[in-house]
Structures are given as C-alpha cells and as structure tokens.
Amino acid sequence: VESATSQLYLDGATARVFAKAEEAAKTAGDAFVTTERLLSAIAREGGPAGDALKSAGVTADMLDAAVADVRKGKPADSAGAEEAQAAL
C-alpha cells in the first residue's frame, strides 16, 4: 500500500512472507531474495495464496526440493541468477 508520502508499507502478513523469504535466502547462501523463495514463503505462511497452493497439493517442502534440484547447489548470487537458471 502506498501512502501520501510515497512510502511503501506492507501489512503484517505480507511483511512476514518477505521476512521468511529473506531468511530462507540467507540460509541458502543467496545474495538476493528470489521469486522461488517468495513462493515457498507464501506456502509456509498461508493466507489466500498459500491456501490455493495447498489446495493444489503444493507444499513449501516440495517447492524447496524443486529449487534445490534445479539449482544443483548453486546460490542466487547475482541479479540475473533467475534468468540464468531459467535458461537451463
């Protein structure tokens, strides 16, 4: 949500998702919070998007395993890391 001062403020649930994604990125040695870390955090935190993932049979652990498989141990260490992985 943007205020009159052009500052961006997140509600509590959204802030928790970003915090979880940042924590996961740091644990994995990533220099950036990638979209797959955000998706995994959404699955962990729940809410409407997390509920949709759950109803589709998707869990955070499944997402984390898929990321590990695609990355083959390589961290996201540059802003273009996601594009480089997509090329694989």
Image (cartoon, rainbow, N blue to C red):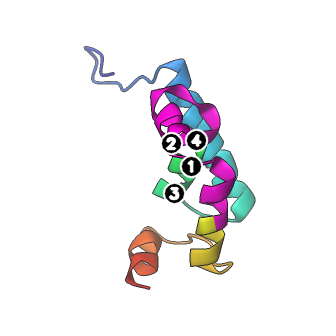
Q: Marks 4 and 1: CB-CB under 8 Å?
A: yes
Q: CA distance from mark 3 to mark 2?
A: 13 Å
> Which disc, if any, is residue 67?
none
Q: CA distance from mark 3 to mark 1?
A: 13 Å
Q: Marks 2 and 1: CB-CB under 8 Å?
A: yes
Q: Marks 4 and 3: CB-CB under 8 Å?
A: no
Question: Mark 2 or 1 closer to N-term?
Answer: 2
Question: Mark 4 or 2 closer to N-term?
Answer: 4
Q: CA distance from mark 4 to mark 3?
A: 11 Å
In this view, the residue in front, 62 or 30, is 62
Residue that mark 1 sits on: 58
- Report helix, strand or loop for mark 4: helix
Residue that mark 4 sits on: 43
Residue type at mark 1 is Val
Q: Is residue 19 visible from the viewing direction of this image?
A: yes
Residue type at mark 3 is Glu
Residue that mark 3 sits on: 36
> Which percent across, then down, holds residue 23?
68, 47
Residue type at mark 4 is Ala
Q: Give the residue drawn at x 56%, y 35%.
A: 17
Q: Quadrant of the N terminus?
A: top left
Q: Marks 4 and 2: CB-CB under 8 Å?
A: yes
The label nearer to you, 4 versus 2, is 2
How many marks can you see? 4
Bounds of the magenta segment: 43-65
Residue that mark 2 sits on: 53
Task: Judge whether 37 appears above or below 10 on screen.
Answer: below
The label nearer to you, 3 versus 1, is 1
Within the image, what quadrant is residue 70 found in?
bottom right
